[in-house]
Image (cartoon, rainbow, N blue to C red):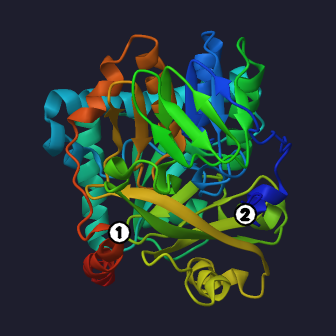
Amino acid sequence: MQSHADSYYAASAHSVLDHPALHDNLEVDVCIVGAGITGCSAALNLAERGYKVAVLDSHKVGWGASGRSGGQMIFGYACEQHTLKKLVGDTVGRQLWDISIEALTQMRQRIDKHNIHCDLANGHLHAAVKPRHMKELESWANSLRQDYGYDSLEMWSKEQVRGQMSTEAYLGGLYDSASGHVHPLNYTLGLAQAAAEAEAGAQFFEYTPATRIEQGEHPVVHTPHGVVRCRHLLLCGNAYLEGIAPDIERKIMPVGTYITATEPLGEERARQLIANNMAVADINFVLDYFRLSADHRLLFGGRVSYSGLDPVNLADSMGKRLRHVFPQLKGVKQAYTWGGYVGITMNRAPHFGRLNGNVYFAQGFSGHGIALTGMAGSLMADAIAGSAERFDLFSRIPHHDFPGGRLLRTPALVLAMTWYRLRDLL
């Protein structure tokens, strides 16, 4: 059991509240396992409706991916819309698309309503590294405009990208004015505070792992020093569920991803790197992604680990990637380097559903969850309150277990990912 990762986000968190560990038995309407964005969002929505809610986390609120990520809030899904449409058909695909766009709107509304100070900034660029990327982005943009009426997209040439970023690394890109970026830990902490201050006042318990669950008419969650009995149970641990729900854990794979933060560059130098303060991600399968922080650092993410082990010389390798994009940062110190796990699915589509009717889960955001996790929590809350239609749309997405079970699924995935890494080089 640990406090937050040694990251720039933890160092710049506005207020990290201490919540007690559970040392008693509780009876509540809803128990939520996992105090990331999904769990905090569900708690907020339910507490606003008057439900008695308990949220359990093995560590601190926002300890996992919700408090460590790149902070990029982007439209759509990790699997991309054309793949989603093949999986569920045109009608459901359109409904799921609309939910993803609503997630961006909801996020901005919550930040405003609850006065969450999380450095919200607008704008995002999907950057092309190779000529074929430009063709893919053009096709993608045309489809989203024509089929879904998504008109906030602009194709940028190399010169247009160069006008906003001081780098020669990209041939162009697809800019979206409706996407953006935030400080993810401060956003998560803000949701938790809003949930605790809502009408029914959600209770948060830190350093309280769920060791076992009993399903049934009244689910029971066992912890080291108490049990929680409830009418509804939400499993929001994603890559960190750790053995309490094997049936759904087999559908996701924890994958390590990493970020480094430079020392403060000063406003002038930072804006020379990214003039319009947008977030950026290339479209390689193993991608680089980056943005500026509110105090004018460059936050640069990339690298992945499928083995469960962090890469050797992580800070050095991250620094090399950073300087490949921005060679003018040679000699700039890296103040923080950290990582964490995201939960990916086989098809990269999100995995939402139920176990035995009153146990809900949302997982497998596949690195595309800043906005969608908040919407997932709201949809689970809606389902508990009696409006389950939109949550149940996600159960139409077919999902499969990762092959090989716990022992062999990691080496099997490493072999599969080798092909994608080779493709990035072509």
Amino acid type, label 1 = Arg
User: How busy is the neighbourhood of tag 1: few (under 14 within 10 Å), some, or many (20 plus)?
Assistant: few
Q: Name the residue that disc number 1 marks.
A: 406
Q: Is residue 422 left or right of residue 233?
A: left
Distance between the alpha carbons at the discs numbered 1 and 2: 26 Å
Provide the secondary structure element on which disc 1 rests. helix
> Between 40 and 113, which is closer to the camera in this rendering?
40
Say which label, 1 or 2, has the lower sequence index: 2
The location of residue 184, given as percent across then percent down, is: 66, 48
Q: Secondary structure at mark 2?
A: loop
Residue 309 against residue 213 in the figure, above or below: below
> At x 57% / y 74%, what residue is drawn?
167
Q: Amino acid at mark 2?
A: Ala
Can residue 34 be spotted in the picture? Answer: no
Q: Is residue 379 above or below residue 264?
A: above
Q: In which quadrant will I find the N terminus?
A: bottom right
Using the rendered view, name the quadrant where residue 120 is placed. Answer: top right
Residue at left 64%, top 57%?
68
Say the numbered circle drawn on residue 5: 2
Q: In what quadrant of the picture does the C terminus appear?
A: bottom left
